[in-house]
């Protein structure tokens, strides 16, 4: 077993009854998610929807992350992204609101309270998106309504039913994700996103290959995809290990503790969150401008039309420049917020630990913050490059259809590595060689 390949390790995982049960449960939940993703809301014009997602690349981007649920306007069209947005808001608010910061330090009970409030915040966020999504797509279709009589002014009960069904679909997916976390393998919410991307990715590839058969472009795209995957793995696994010395404690006649360890500071500690958050923020201008495009005043409709075309099509250099800047900024911001919440310097001091050459307390916190900022530069620039890579590839190769897959690759590779690491730990606990160990 010392040189067991990946296939052998996978077979070993299925030989263990409880691990096999976890894997089968995860697969069953993913199958259930795919069934949910194909339940449309009542009255949706599927043909009009397909025309939108065939011609609008940015709409195809969000459809990819919903696993095709958005292009059929399923009850799961919003995916788990309202919940992710609520998580980001709660994490940002904790350093700002002292009471939330105190609750976050209460251990498991505090985390449960914050998680409950996150679920409550998800509901209004999902309701707003459920109302705005059909309106935005209606404007994108050029006036062809995808849902007839949608709006509280024309059909209040029908509109309310659609909003409630989409909110319920989002909460159902969150529940499925939490079941996977508890009884399956991997982080459930990430697995849901992972499953949606993988389910839609083959269709996107087939669509691209059927539309453009230039083998030179396909070869260039394959090279870029391979290099991107290798770079994602390299950066995702990259970390700076800060050495830590644990002082010995004398209790009576016994000497306890002591030794050395390290603090792993990841190059990309923010993960995929900056990409999702930046794309959501850039969607807001097009949503707001869509309500002003038809205004009779040309001083209002003119700028609104420019904003809508710039941010909705996803083909403007302005859009991609702002995307790069926002991804880099959010990466730094999110990494620092997460670092402050961990209170590493305080935890080290409580455990009689210290970094050699650095005084405990505030100097340790300053030192770790400076190190994190330096290594995050590489992670932030990498995420920014991954974000704008579709635009760069399209500009140099002319390959038009596969322009949004780099972000999907980042999420797929990241979730796959995290899941494999969990399986690795499970196998090592049972004296098996894992996926990563050799």
Image (cartoon, helix red, strand yellow):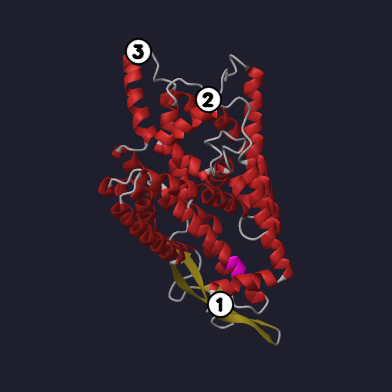
Residue 421 is situated, as x and y percent measured from the top left of the image, at 57, 67
Which residue does the numbered mark 2 point to in the structure image? 146
Q: Is residue 337 left or right of residue 107?
A: left
Residue at point 65% right, 79% down? 431
Of the pair 215 and 318, the residue shown nearer to us: 215
Mark 3, secondary structure of its residue: loop
Work out how far the residue at label 2 is from the one at label 1, CA to CA, in angstroms.
63 Å
**Chain-order first, disc 1 or disc 3:** 1
Give the number of the mark in front: 3 or 2.
2
Give the number of the mark in front: 1 or 3.
3
Residue 325 is situated, as x and y percent measured from the top left of the image, at 35, 45
Residue 348 is situated, as x and y percent measured from the top left of the image, at 55, 68
Give the number of the mark in front: 2 or 1.
2
Of the pair 60 and 268, the residue shown nearer to us: 60
Work out how far the residue at label 3 is from the one at label 2, CA to CA, in angstroms.
27 Å
Q: Residue furthest right?
A: 17
- Asked whether residue 316 is drawn in magenta, I would say no
Q: Are marks 3 and 2 in contact (CB under 8 Å)?
A: no
Which residue does the numbered mark 3 point to in the structure image? 297
**Chain-order first, disc 2 or disc 1:** 2
Residue at point 43% right, 36% down? 54
Label 1 packing within 10 angstroms: few (<14), some (14-19), many (20+):
some
Q: Residue furthest top?
A: 296
Judged by its main secondary structure, the magenta piece is helix
Q: Are marks 2 and 1 in contact (CB under 8 Å)?
A: no
Work out how far the residue at label 1 is from the one at label 3, CA to CA, in angstroms.
69 Å
Question: 223 above or below 319?
Answer: below
Of the pair 85 and 160, the residue shown nearer to us: 160
Instruction: Report the span colored magenta.
Output: 421-425
Which residue does the numbered mark 1 point to in the structure image? 246
Q: Is residue 17 left or right of residue 336?
A: right
Q: Is residue 292 left or right of residue 190?
A: left
């Amino acid at each position: 077993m010392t040189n067991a390949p990946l296939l052998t390790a996978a077979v070993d995982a299925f030989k263990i009854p409880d691990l096999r049960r976890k894997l089968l449960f995860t697969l069953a939940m993913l199958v259930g998610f795919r069934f949910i993703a194909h339940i449309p809301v009542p009255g949706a014009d599927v043909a009009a929807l397909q025309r939108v997602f065939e011609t609008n690349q940015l709409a195809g981007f969000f459809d990819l992350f919903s696993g095709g649920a958005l292009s059929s306007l399923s009850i799961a069209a919003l995916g788990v992204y309202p919940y992710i947005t609520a998580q980001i808001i709660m994490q940002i608010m904790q350093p700002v609101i002292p009471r939330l910061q105190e609750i976050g330090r209460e251990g498991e009970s505090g985390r449960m309270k914050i998680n409950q409030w996150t679920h409550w915040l998800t509901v209004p966020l999902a309701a707003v998106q459920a109302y705005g999504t059909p309106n935005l797509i209606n404007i994108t279709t050029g006036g062809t309504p995808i849902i007839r009589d949608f709006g509280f002014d024309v059909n209040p009960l029908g509109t309310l039913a659609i909003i409630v069904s989409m909110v319920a679909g989002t909460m159902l997916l969150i529940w499925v994700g939490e079941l996977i976390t508890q009884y399956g393998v991997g982080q459930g919410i990430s697995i849901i996103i992972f499953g949606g991307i993988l389910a839609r990715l083959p269709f996107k590839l087939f669509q691209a290959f059927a539309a453009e058969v230039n083998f030179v472009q396909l070869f260039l795209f394959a090279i870029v995809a391979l290099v991107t995957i290798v770079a994602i793995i390299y950066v995702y696994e990259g970390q700076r290990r800060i050495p830590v010395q644990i002082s010995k404690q004398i209790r009576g006649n016994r000497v306890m503790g002591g030794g050395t360890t390290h603090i792993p500071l990841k190059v990309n500690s923010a993960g995929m969150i900056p990409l999702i958050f930046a794309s959501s923020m850039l969607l807001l201008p097009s949503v707001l401008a869509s309500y002003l495009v038809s205004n009779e005043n040309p001083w209002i409709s003119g700028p609104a039309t420019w904003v809508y075309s710039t941010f909705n099509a996803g083909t403007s250099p302005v859009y991609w420049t702002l995307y790069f800047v926002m991804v880099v900024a959010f990466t730094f911001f999110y990494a620092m917020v997460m670092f402050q919440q961990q209170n590493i310097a305080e935890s080290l001091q409580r455990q009689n630990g210290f970094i050699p050459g650095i005084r405990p307390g505030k100097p340790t916190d300053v030192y770790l913050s400076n190190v994190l900022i330096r290594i995050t530069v590489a992670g932030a620039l990498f995420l920014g490059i991954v974000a704008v890579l579709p635009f760069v590839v399209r500009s140099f190769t002319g390959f038009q259809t596969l322009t949004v897959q780099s972000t999907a690759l980042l999420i797929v590779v990241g979730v796959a590595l995290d899941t494999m690491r969990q399986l690795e730990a499970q196998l090592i606990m049972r004296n098996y060689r894992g996926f990563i160990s050799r």
